[in-house]
Image (cartoon, rainbow, N blue to C red):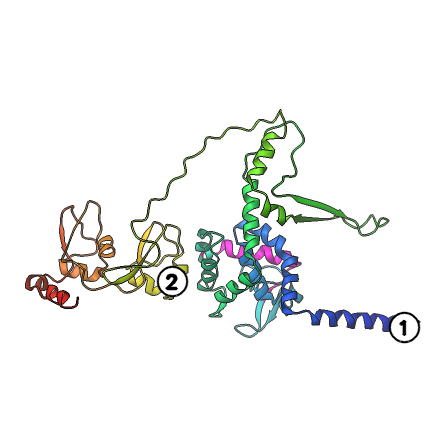
């Protein structure tokens, strides 16, 4: 009898394993997403790491949960021990032989540690200045900060996000965050626990009726359909109308600062025969470099900019090397203009502007001052003008 039971168990195990092996990569990836989308959303709300980026990294780093590191160590993001790690460790070959990796008690703990890993390290700090919807900036920023050695890591992340529509989980987290930030009513009634826009259901499950020793599990499921179809404003209206005793404190609407109209056209345009764009404050320079197929170092070089990650103000940027000579002979300085601003407005290299006018980078300018945009000798002899006339 025992032999028959053993044979049946072996048969069931083989069939189950065979079924798992027959699943396609797409099916395995979708199953992985369904397992970890809630924790990805929770972590975005807690730390700001976009849910779409986290899920895509988890899929790639853990091979949708089937890598040895994910199976044996619950490490879904390939995070190595580092000096501060005091938890359990495991060793396996990676960039070098026998590298130390962190071991977690659960996959969820791996997801939380991944957030803290990014949030607390200075070389990742620039990522958190990006919008959570700027997945291109995040993908290329992770590569630049040294998260992965693969040169195609950003493209792989973006492809996974696109193929499996992971962006929806970032948007869902943003909707939940907006709902949480809605005005809270002051009332003596029992607290409102549900809304028409975002609703969390807490389902208490017990394995068996007679087994009272098992702990009750709390599973929070977010109704994505409701978030997609109901406006967040409905939450505020329901909360305001819920009770006659409810008093919603009035909050003066803060005037939203209007964006200044761009002084330049949308998209790519030319200044002094050189391609340029106008980028807004908060734009990722790394994302711009990727979009226009140039290296980040060249973008800095073309515009004589110090290395940075995010634009701290609206900027005129060139995506080609500027000309040595200006389109006209002279530029008249206006109040407050700097040499760098003039070089950008005129599409002329800063070094040439300094050379023509015998100035230094920190030279002070005065309103009405006239600066050469071409060699004074050439202007005097009319050489450049003659050349310009003949090329038309």
Around disc 1, counting alpha carbons within 10 Å, would you say few (fewer than 14), some (14 to 19), or many (20 or more)? Answer: few
The location of residue 313, given as percent across then percent down, is: 34, 49
In this picture, residue 317 sits left or right of residue 155 = left
Task: Select label 1 or label 2 by which is in front.
Answer: 2
Residue found farthest to the top? 245
Determine the main secondary structure of the stretch shown in magenta.
Answer: helix
For residue 344, which numbered disc appears in the image? none
Task: Choose between 40 and 91: the one closer to the eye.
Answer: 40
Quadrant of image for the N terminus: bottom right
Q: Which residues are magenta?
A: 101-122
Q: CA distance from mark 1 to mark 2?
A: 66 Å
Q: Which corner quadrant of the image does residue 378 belong to?
A: bottom left
Q: Is residue 296 above or below residue 18?
A: above
Residue 344: tell me if it is visible: yes
The location of residue 365, given as percent across then percent down, is: 17, 49
Q: Is residue 257 above or below residue 209?
A: above
Label 1 sits on residue? 4
Quadrant of image for the C terminus: bottom left
Around disc 2, counting alpha carbons within 10 Å, would you say few (fewer than 14), some (14 to 19), or many (20 or more)? Answer: some
Q: Is residue 119 magenta?
A: yes
Residue at 62 percent of width and 25 percent of height: 244
Label 2 sits on residue? 289
Q: Is residue 71 magenta?
A: no
The location of residue 143, given as percent across then percent down, is: 46, 64
Residue found farthest to the front? 392
The location of residue 249, given as percent across then percent down, is: 53, 28
In this picture, residue 9 sits left or right of residue 149 = right
């Amino acid at each position: 009898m025992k032999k028959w039971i053993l044979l049946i168990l072996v048969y069931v195990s083989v069939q189950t394993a065979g079924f798992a092996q027959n699943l396609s990569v797409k099916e395995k990836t979708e199953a992985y997403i369904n397992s970890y989308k809630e924790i990805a959303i929770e972590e975005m709300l807690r730390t700001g790491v976009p849910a779409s980026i986290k899920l895509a990294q988890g899929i790639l780093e853990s091979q949708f949960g089937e890598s040895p590191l994910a199976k044996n160590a619950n490490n879904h993001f390939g995070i190595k021990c580092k000096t501060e790690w005091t938890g359990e460790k495991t060793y396996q070959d990676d960039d070098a032989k026998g590298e130390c990796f962190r071991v977690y008690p659960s996959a969820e703990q791996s997801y939380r540690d991944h957030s803290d890993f990014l949030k607390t390290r200075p070389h990742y700090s620039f990522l958190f200045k990006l919008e959570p919807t700027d997945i291109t900036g995040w993908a290329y920023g992770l590569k630049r900060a040294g998260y992965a050695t693969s040169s195609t890591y950003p493209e792989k992340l973006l492809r996974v996000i696109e193929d499996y529509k992971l962006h929806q989980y970032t948007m869902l987290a943003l909707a939940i965050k907006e709902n949480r930030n809605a005005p809270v009513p002051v009332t003596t009634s029992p607290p409102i626990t549900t809304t028409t826009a975002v609703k969390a259901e807490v389902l208490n499950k017990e394995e068996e009726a007679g087994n009272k020793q098992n702990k009750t599990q709390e599973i929070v499921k977010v109704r994505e359909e409701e978030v997609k179809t109901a406006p967040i404003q409905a939450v505020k209206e329901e909360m305001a109308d819920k009770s006659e005793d409810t008093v919603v404190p009035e909050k003066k609407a803060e005037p939203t600062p209007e964006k200044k109209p761009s002084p330049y056209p949308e998209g790519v345009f030319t200044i002094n025969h050189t391609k340029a764009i106008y980028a807004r404050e908060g734009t990722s320079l790394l994302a711009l470099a990727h979009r226009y197929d140039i290296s980040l170092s060249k973008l800095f070089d073309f515009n004589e900019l110090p290395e940075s990650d995010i634009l701290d103000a609206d900027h005129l940027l060139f995506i080609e090397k500027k000309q040595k000579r200006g389109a006209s002979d002279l530029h008249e300085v206006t109040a407050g203009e700097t040499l760098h601003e003039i070089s950008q407005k005129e599409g002329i290299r800063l070094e040439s502007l300094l050379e023509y006018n015998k100035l230094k980078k920190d030279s002070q300018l005065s309103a009405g001052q006239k600066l050469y945009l071409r060699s004074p000798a050439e202007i005097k002899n009319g050489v450049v003008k003659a050349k310009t006339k003949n090329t038309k």
